[in-house]
Structures are given as structure tokens and as C-alpha cells.
Image (tube, helix red, strand yellow):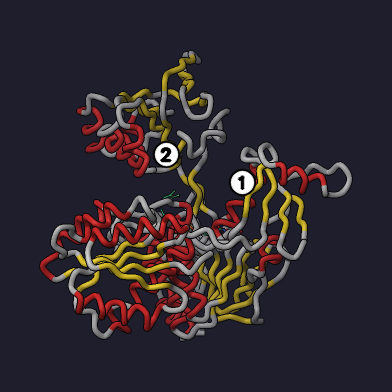
Amino acid sequence: MATPIIIAVDDDPQVRNAVRRDLNAHFAPDYRVLDAGSGAEGLEVLEALKARGDVVALFLVDQRMPEMTGTEFLVEARPFFPDAKRALLTAYADTDAAISAINEVDLDHYLMKPWDPPEDNLYPILDDLLEDWVANTPATFDGIRVVGTTWSPATYEVKDFLARNQIPYRFLDIERDEEAEAILRAGSDDDQTIPVVLFADGTRLVDPDRRAIAEQVGLQTEADKPFYDLIIVGGGPAGLAAAVYGASEGLRTVMVESEAPGGQAGTSSRIENYLGFPSGVSGADLARRAATQAARLGAELLTATTVASVTTEDNIKVVTLDTGAEMRSHAVLIASGMSLRKLNVPGYERFEGAGVFYGAALAEAATYRDQPVYVVGGANSAGQAAMLFSKYASQVTMVVRGESLELKMSAYLIDQIAAQDNIDVVVGTQVVEVEGENRVERIRLKNLKTEEESVDEAAAIFIFVGAVPHSDFVTDLVATNDRGFIYTGPDIALAEDVVWRLDRDPLALETSVPGVFAAGDVRHDAMRRVASAVGTGAMSVSMIHQYLSEV
Ligand SMILES: Cc1cc2nc3c(=O)[nH]c(=O)nc-3n(C[C@H](O)[C@H](O)[C@H](O)COP(=O)(O)OP(=O)(O)OC[C@H]3O[C@@H](n4cnc5c(N)ncnc54)[C@H](O)[C@@H]3O)c2cc1C
């Protein structure tokens, strides 16, 4: 790929010279720095670059320019290089314009003039934007090829694992690609098993598990040290936050993650409510940043590695992996999160993401404007979603298994739903099938009393049928509620038959076993949000320090 370009647009020659000088000093030779004296001139440059096949990575544009403002320029520039990062140079008085540009042009950042010293006020911000750009720009193909079909779950798993670990690959579909068929035929005998994964060094793995891929691409899967201060189980936001704080505060810290860093948050296309990201942040970006930060601060991150059990030997915690390997530490943090329960009926899998959504896929609400949508579930989360979708959809139907909403929903929500003309509630009913060609078109419902079935038009189905905690590997060790969510701190008293064996009270995030802590969604009564997972993950480290001072 040709050297990517940074374009600065500023009408003031003095500012333009200063920008060019500072950008060249830090970013050459990795980036080529070009500049223009007006929006119109900038657009001419873009046209020429596009024609030559060049790539722009970043626009740095002054908001205050006569004839065409910075925001207006970015609107015009976007179709040329839609993936380029967009930053505005603003004066204090332009802050409002910059904030509205976040929505108008998907602005990534606005910087205040003057930016001296650039080491503090310019480079860190632009470095960050460019790192993001690099991570999201298809890298020069480095040789990993995945051969399979779009509809094969095993192929999907391999692609998902590579993508979530930020490993570039090329997908070859055997139904459409001759090269794919040739690769498959080159395998031994008549074996047509898919997926086949080919690596740059010629290694060929057939239907590999995550661990085999991780080892082949050089991800760490085994612990380096014989003993740690802190072992963290799970690499979602809670585990990553604990890894960052643990390592930065001098604890020998290892995080064990069975899939890829990021957890549930890593699968979200845009997290809009995480503090400090006014334009939202994709789960993949957040995970990549946090994992890089944790590793830089000295935490070990094991991926594709699953914890099978946690036991204690006096004060020592023994963490056994599913490979049989053991790791030992003073303290353990369980940050293994949860999964949303799936709707197990014919059709649902085929349409996942194409009309069937789990949880409040808020970003999808507007997609189904003026179309009929279904919300499955009868608790508060389902009610809140129904209210939200009713602003867009022509009709929202809530499908509830129980005999009434009162069983699980707060009274205020029941009132709001009753007052909303375009929400219908069908109780004592369950979904039996999801139907359609390439996307959801119909839903088949069954009345549980009469057994009568009906088929109705549906454009999308949002599912809120509960959550399953990832706590199987510790249910013999720590106290949990009847659904398997882990009790911590004062809530331990809610568990029957638990004897707390120390003189002091359990610390706020400590489980019923001293030195074993829990953070994030796996806790009983957790607020299921990225910020609270990060908050409890970070807080747990100060409690772990307190615990370590006792042992
Ligand atoms: C699609 C989607 C969108 C969301 N959007 C938002 C949003 O916009 N804003 C918001 O605030 N919240 C959002 N959430 C909720 C948010 O993502 C979660 O609250 C948060 O991720 C919980 O973090 P956690 O670290 O506790 O657990 P998780 O994110 O569940 O991570 C737990 C990790 O532990 C690993 N693990 C489990 N068991 C083991 C084991 N035995 N050994 C090793 N590793 C193990 C799992 O693989 C997983 O990576 C969203 C959730 C989803 C599913």
C-alpha cells in the first residue's frame, strides 16, 4: 500500500505552516503530510489523490475558514475517503460547532488552537486516531486464508475469533471462489471438511479449535510465571480494567480469556454511553485499546484459554485450565460475565443479526421505522425496549410467556406501555418459529393454553429472555443466587449455609471465599453496563491490595 496521507486544511498561512511542520516532525516517514489553503483547494487535492489510488488516513481541518467552514469541508470530503479519521482545529468559541459536527460528519475529535506543546496537545490525540485507523483498515494481506462457506457455523467461529483478536485474514467462499475450491481439493484424500485455515508459512489447519489458531498466530496461551499475585478469569471490560489497574499497581497479574479480549462489549458495534467517547466507540476498538494498555503495563494476557475450576489450598488459589494445566496465586478475580439467553426455535440462528437481535440493539431501532417489530420477554428490559421501538416501528408486539406483565415488570412501565397506542401485549404465548427468505419476514406464535398457532408479518424480533452467568467453574466454591450469579460483600448474607470464616466482614467485591473476588456482569444484581464492569474491575484491585496485606 502507498504511504497513507494526512491532509491539513487551513486558510491562515502561518497556522498552516505550523501544522505542516509539527505533523512532519512526528509522523514522517510513516505518513505523507499534504496541505491546502481552503476547502475548495482541499477538495481538488482529494480528487487527484483518489484518481491516483492514494489513501487518506486523517483530515485535520480548521473550523473557521471563509467560504467553506471546516465542517462543510468534511461533509464534502467524506465520500472521497469515508474511513479517514476526521479532526477539527477550533478556537474556544467554535466548541458548539465542533460538538454538532460529531453528529453531522461523525467527527472523531476536535482540538483547540494553539496546540503547543504538540507533544502534549497534538501528537497523543492524533497517534490515537491513527492507531484506530490502522486497526480498522484492511491490512496488507499477510497470508491467513479461511476457506469455508458463509452459512457454516464452524467457519463463522473461526472468522469471528480471528476478527475479535484483530488478526487480518482473507475469506474464500467455496460456493463462489475458484481459489477456495482448489485449496480444498489440495487437501488429503476426499476430505471436504471446512473450514480450512491456511497460514503464511504453509501450515494447513482443518476445522481447528481456537487454541490451535491462537498458537499458530503467536497469541499467548500459557502462563509465563509459576505464581501470581492476581489471576483474573475473563477478559471483558471488568477483567481488562482489573488487568490494567493490577499491573499498573505492581501486582504480578495474569488475565485468562477463553475467546478474545472484549467480552460482550467486544461484540457491540457502537457503545454510545461510555464516558469520554462523545462519538461512541466500537466494542472492538475499546477492547483493542484496553488489551494493549494492560499488556503495556505488564499484565500477561492469555487468550483462547478456558478456566475449568478454581480451588483453594489454605490461602493459595489454584486455577485449573481445561488443558489440565494449573496456575497459582494469592488472589483470584472472577470476571467471567454472562451470555444473553438465546431463543431456541427453528429459524432464529439463520436470522441472527438479520432481523433477530439479542438485547436492546438500540442502533437497530431506527432501521425498522414504519415496520412491525416484536419484542420477546416480559421483564423491565423488554418493556423499556418496547417503549423505545414504539417511537419508530409501525407496531410493536410484546410476546410474553407468563399470564401477565405484572409478574416481572415495574408498574410505571406497565402504565407507559398501556398508554402507547402502537404497543400490543400478547400474554401466555411463545414464539415457535421465525420465517423468511433472506431476512425475517414472519413470526409464528403459539397460545400456550389453546395451543392455537398464528403467523404474522414481522420485520424484526428483539429478544429479552434472560441471561446465563458464566460461573459453572466456581459454583462449587463460592456462593451464588439460584440462577448462578455470584454473591459479593454484604449480599453473601443472602446465601443459605454459608459460613464466613474471617473476623472481618467480606470486602465489597469479595465472594464467600476470602481472596476470591468477583466483578462485572457475573455478580448478583450487577448493573449490566460497560462502565459498571470497568468500575467494579478497577475497584476490585484496591480490595485485592487490602486482602494481600493480610496474607
Ligand atoms: C451486543 C451487546 C451490546 C451492548 N451494548 C452496550 C452498550 O452500548 N453500553 C453498555 O454500557 N453496555 C452494553 N452492553 C453490556 C456490556 O457489554 C456488559 O455489561 C459488559 O461487557 C460486562 O462486562 P464483563 O467484563 O462483566 O463481562 P463480559 O463482557 O461478559 O466478559 C466476560 C469474559 O469472560 C470470558 N470467560 C467466561 N468464562 C470463562 C472461563 N471459564 N475462562 C476464561 N474466560 C472466560 C468470556 O469469554 C468473556 O470474554 C452490551 C452487551 C451486548 C451483548
Mark 2 → mark 1, Cα distance in angstroms: 24 Å
The quadrant holding residue 398 is top left
Residue 277 vs 545, above or below: the answer is above
Front-most of residues 259 and 529: 259
- Residue at 75% across / 65% down in the picture? 201
Q: At numbered mark 2, what does the secondary structure look like: helix, strand or loop?
A: loop
Give the image location of residue 322, x and y in percent: 69, 62
- Residue at 40% across / 62% down in the picture? 56
Q: Earlier in the sequence, mark 2 or mark 1?
A: 1
Marks 1 and 2: in contact by CB < 8 Å?
Answer: no
Give the image location of residue 15, x and y in percent: 21, 77
**Residue on which disc 2 sits:** 464
Residue 94 vs 229, above or below: the answer is above
- Residue at 33% across / 40% down in the picture? 380
Give the image location of residue 544, x and y in percent: 45, 77
The residue lying furthest to the right in this view is: 189
- Residue at 43% across / 64% down in the picture? 133
The quadrant holding residue 477 is bottom right
**Residue on which disc 1 sits:** 156
Front-most of residues 361 and 408: 361
Give the image location of residue 467, x and y in percent: 47, 46
**Residue 43 in sight here:** yes
- Horizontally, residue 496 falls left or right of residue 405, namely right
Circle 2: residue type? Phe
- Horizontally, residue 403 falls left or right of residue 90, namely right
The quadrant holding residue 359 is top left
